[in-house]
Amino acid sequence: MRCHNKESLANLKSMTLAQLEQAYVAHGRNSTRLATTLGLSRCAVENKMRHTGIITRTPSEFVREHNLSKNSVPLTDGQHALILGSLLGDSCLYTSTSGGLGIRFCHSVAQLGYLLHKQQAFSGRASKLYEVPLNNFRSRRWSFTFTSTPCLEPYIDLCKSQGPLRPKTVTEEWASRLTLESISYWFEDDGYIVVSNPRTNCTIAGFCTNSFSKIECEILAEVLQNFGLTVRLVSSGRNKDQFILLSRWSDETRHFLGKLTCHHPCLHYKFRTALQ
C-alpha cells in the first residue's frame, strides 16, 4: 500500500532505532495503532521496523496477548462465587495449549441457557463457546472456556489436584470461602430433588458428590449445616468409597432451597417444590 503523506514518511525515516522501538512499545506493540498515530500505512511502519531490526509480534501472538490482558482483570466477588461453586459441580481447571491456566464450564444442551448465563457473568473477558463432541452416551453438550493465568492461579492451591483421576480436591480453605451464591451454583450443577418413594410420597434433596472422598464430603456437609441444611452421607450404589449428600424433605430443606438463587428458568425444576 502506497503512502502519500511525504512529511509523515520523512519523519518515519528519520526516527532512530531507539525512538521507533519506544513508540512501538508505547502503542501496546500494535503496529496498526502506531501507523494511525503517525498518519501512515501499517505496511510503511512495519517495513521500517523490519529494516531497523525490530521484531514485531505475529498475529497469533497479538491475539494471545490481547486476550490475556482482557482476562488479567481481577475477578469480582460474584465471579469468585461462581467459580468456587461451579468447581464443586460441572467445571474444571485446565492448562491451555499455550501454557495458560483456564477454566471450563460444560452443560447439556437442555441447560444451554444456564451456560450462557455463566458466560455473561464473565462478560468482557476473552472466551470461547462451542459444542462438545458427543460422548459415549450420545448426549449433546456445550462448553464455555476462558484462559486467564493471573486471576485463576490462586485456585491451583485452593483446589489442589491429586493426579489425573482426582482433578480437584475440596480443602478446608475452599470450603471456608463458599457463600450461599456459591452453593446455588453447586446445587444447580449437581443438586437434585427427587421422590424416592412414590407410594409414600417421600421426597429427598441431595448433592452428587461421587467424585469426592468421605473426608471431602464431611467438609461439605459441615458447610451445608452452617448454612442451615442438615445432610447425611450415603454410599453411592455398590461402591462404598463413593458418597452422596442427602437431606430428607422438611421445612428446613424448603427454607434452605428458598435462600438459594435460581439463575435461569431452565433450572426451575430443581427448585420446584421450594418455589411452590
Image (cartoon, helix red, strand yellow):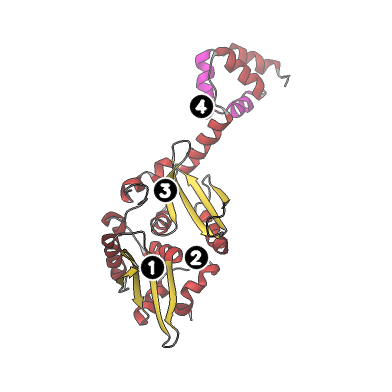
**Residue on which disc 1 sits:** 207
**Sequence-first disc among 4 and 3:** 4
**Residue on which disc 4 sits:** 26
Q: Residues within 10 Å of mark 1 (few under 14, many from 20)?
A: many
Horizontal and vertical percent position of residue 70: 50, 42
- Between marks 1 and 2, how big is the CA–CA gap? 18 Å
- Describe the element under mark 1 as helix, strand or loop: strand
Q: Residue furthest front?
A: 238
Image marks 4 and 3: residues in contact by CB distance under 8 Å: no
- Describe the element under mark 3 as helix, strand or loop: strand
- Between marks 3 and 2, how big is the CA–CA gap? 22 Å
Residue closest to the eye, 72 or 140: 140
Circle 3: residue type: Leu
Image marks 3 and 2: residues in contact by CB distance under 8 Å: no
Image quarter of residue 139: bottom right
Q: Residues within 10 Å of mark 3 (few under 14, many from 20)?
A: many
**Sequence-first disc among 1 and 4:** 4
Residue closest to the eye, 176 or 21: 176
Circle 4: residue type: Ala
The quadrant in which the N terminus is found is: top right
Image quarter of residue 218: bottom left
**Residue on which disc 2 sits:** 263
Give the magenta-colored segment's residue range. 17-38
Q: Residues within 10 Å of mark 2 (few under 14, many from 20)?
A: some
Please check the rendered image and state whether residue 2 is part of the magenta-colored stretch, yes or no.
no
Does residue 158 sit above or below 261 in this rendering? above
**Closer to the camera: disc 1 or disc 4?**
1
